[in-house]
Amino acid sequence: VIESAVTVDEDIETAVANILAQMTLEEKVGQMIQPNLLEVTPEEAKEYKLGSLLNGGGAWPNEDKYASAADWAETADEYWEALEEAYADRGFRIPFIWATDAVHGHNNVYGATVFPHNIGLGAANNPDLIEQIGQATAEEVAATGLDWTFAPTVAAPRDYRWGRVYEGYSEDPEIIYQYASRMVQGLQGGAEGLKSETHVISNVKHWVGDGGTYDGEDRGENHYTEEYLRNIHATGYFAGLDAGAQVVMSSFNSWHNDANYDQNGTGDYNYKMHGSKYMLNDVLKNQMGFDGLIVTDWNGQSEITNCTSANCPEAVNAGNDVFMVTENSNWKAFYQNVIDQVNDGTISEERIDDAVTRILRVKMRAGLWDKPKPSERELAGNDDVLGSDAHRAIARQAVSESLVLLKNKNGILPLSTEASYIVTGSAANDITKQTGGWSLTWQGTDNTLEDDFPGATTLLMAIEDVVGEENVYTSTEDAPADAIAIVVIGEDPYAEMYGDISASETLEFASLNSGYAEDSAEVIALAEAGYPVVTVFYSGRPLYVNEEIMASDAFVAAWLPGTEAGGITDVLFAEDGADFKGRLSYSWPNTVCSTTINRDAPNIENYTTPVDGQTGELIEQETTGEYAPLFPYGYGLGYASSDTE
Ligand code: GLC
């Protein structure tokens, strides 16, 4: 049972009941609808008396990628004021709120600090830092006048073919449990902080089992037994909800195993979490006692059998409270369908009242009735908060502490500031590989450093800052014979299913999409030419890079560090005594097929009951048999460690 840090406040409960009792069915349903910014105007928000909106990845005010903090806050004002007008003659108010994916800083916003993605934070293994990052992120979200972030992700990614491994802190609940608490604390600031103008509503996601799908398929089938679903995939919820997170987001994956066959009695053996009354209402709300609100994922209701984005009473009855209806403005049809389904008895009024009670409760706990309109709040419109020196310093520290040193032959590291360097590789000066997905846009592509990330530093720039541009060469052409090669290689940015590695592909970096073959060739060519090679690897997950590691004198896993690559040179050059502190929060694969090489892999057959959702046939589950990673969970060298071969 959850013991939330945001406890029940009888005054709030009374006020909520009082407003609910006065609301019409239309007003209640309006609170449950959450369109995308691009598909709703302030006038429509007023007409339908909507409760909230979200901006999806790459949706900005006025569709302007370079919108300032003031632009965001002024746009938020328009919706806020529209709802104030909507309720002007009703004798009560229901303030409007705006949600966003601030998942590694306020990453949709021009000029914001972009922190390392969660996979790097997991390696940093520094819970205090997590809370600082949450606090800094909350301030940057508040600077734009927004109220709610769809963070943290508390998935436990178990198969490296999943496109969202980097959004998880670790394969193992050991780290997730601590981090979920501290990130929620940083974002919300406890019950009192949540009412303040410098914190935001946090949202643990995606409930439940997103990181454990078969073959790592995004939105795929999770076959875990309920015991392992709880113990591996749900620990972040116990921790995050105890810390007071007010929102849970339903997951796209489906879940089924022997025990829960046809749990809903629908004959649908492979049912989506979005439609699971058992998991949303019975377990999360009733058994665990969660009293905040459940929000669907992006049109998540549409993936339930017999549902569309515009029509899905099953998703309402299962226990979702707010619906992200974000396709072709279907939110208006969804709104009308729910009203009709309440009137014809398909959906009970009690279910609607449960949803709206939770929505009003969360809004009151966030102090919205006492806050001024977004642009008049403490930090709102302040571009100095976005990407502030203080926040970038926290990000730089996080980058340094996230780095994992996998090899350091003959102690080639730390590097000298007096030497010459050949700095090459596809990721050396590529801000998109450095920041990854969810950076200004959903997929993190099409960005340029100069235009899109003011104040950001690529690794090439950071090295030039440390050793002087005159000592940095971008090829062997005119480099001195005693130059050291620093090769920065990495994955292209991706998000969600766009990052999935299909079951027919392997984890071999060099072979994944043709783009990486050049990176691998660069490492090997420089080594064969006799240069000492330091390889820095940007990736959203561990991958098979044995040949590149063998060819390198030193190999650093840098994950997706974000805008502050100075944190990498701080450690490479041991600035002020900096050392490698990062330790693997994911086991590192030893073969191209080690896709699920988790710490407890040997008993994988014990925690899944793989049956085909449609036929009920047992699916052969590959097991690794023994846990034999190239580098185990928790591995990482420091300068004091012995040199490695
Ligand atoms: C996406 C993601 C979810 C995100 C939501 C809103 O599909 O699954 O993590 O919060 O949509 O952008």
Image (cartoon, grey):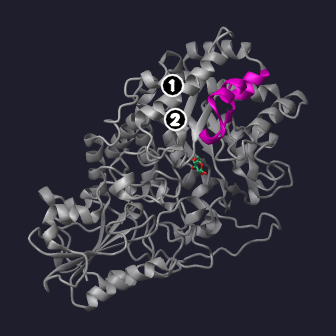
Horizontal side, residue 449 vs residue 638: left or right: right
Pair 2/1: label in front: 2
Q: Position of residue 503 (x, y in %)?
A: 62, 75
Q: Which residues are magenta?
A: 25-49
Taking the image as shown, residue 534 lies to the left or right of residue 563, namely left
- Toward which corner of the image does residue 529 lie, by quadrant? bottom left
Q: Is 180 within the magenta?
A: no
Q: Amino acid at mark 1?
A: Ala
Q: Residue at x 62, y 28 (%)?
A: 42
The image position of residue 312, as x and y in percent, is: 80, 43
From the viewer's perspective, is residue 103 above or below residue 186? below
Is 623 or 109 nearer to us in this picture?
A: 109
Residue 8, visible in the rendered structure: yes
Label disc, if present, on residue 148 of the rendered structure: 2
Residue 456's place in the image compared with 636, above or below, is above
Is residue 35 within the magenta segment? yes
Report the residue at 21% width, 65% height from top: 463
Quarter-of-image position of residue 92: top right
Residue beneath label 1, please?
366
Look at the numbered disc 2 and give the secondary structure of its residue: strand
Most foreground residue, 392 or 643: 392
Q: Amino acid at mark 2?
A: Trp
- The number of discs equals 2
Distance from mark 2 CB to nearest ligand 1 atom below 8 Å: no
SS class of the residue under badge 1?
loop
Q: Is residue 60 left or right of residue 320?
A: left
By secondary structure, the bulk of the magenta-drawn segment is best described as helix
Judge by depth and name the residue closer to the eye, 467 or 121: 467
Within 10 Å of the Cα at label 1, are there few (<14), some (14-19), or many (20+) other Cα atoms?
many
Q: Position of residue 395 (x, y in %)?
A: 31, 49
Tell me how far mark 2 sits from mark 1, CA to CA: 10 Å
Locate the C terminus and report the quarter of the image it occupies: bottom left
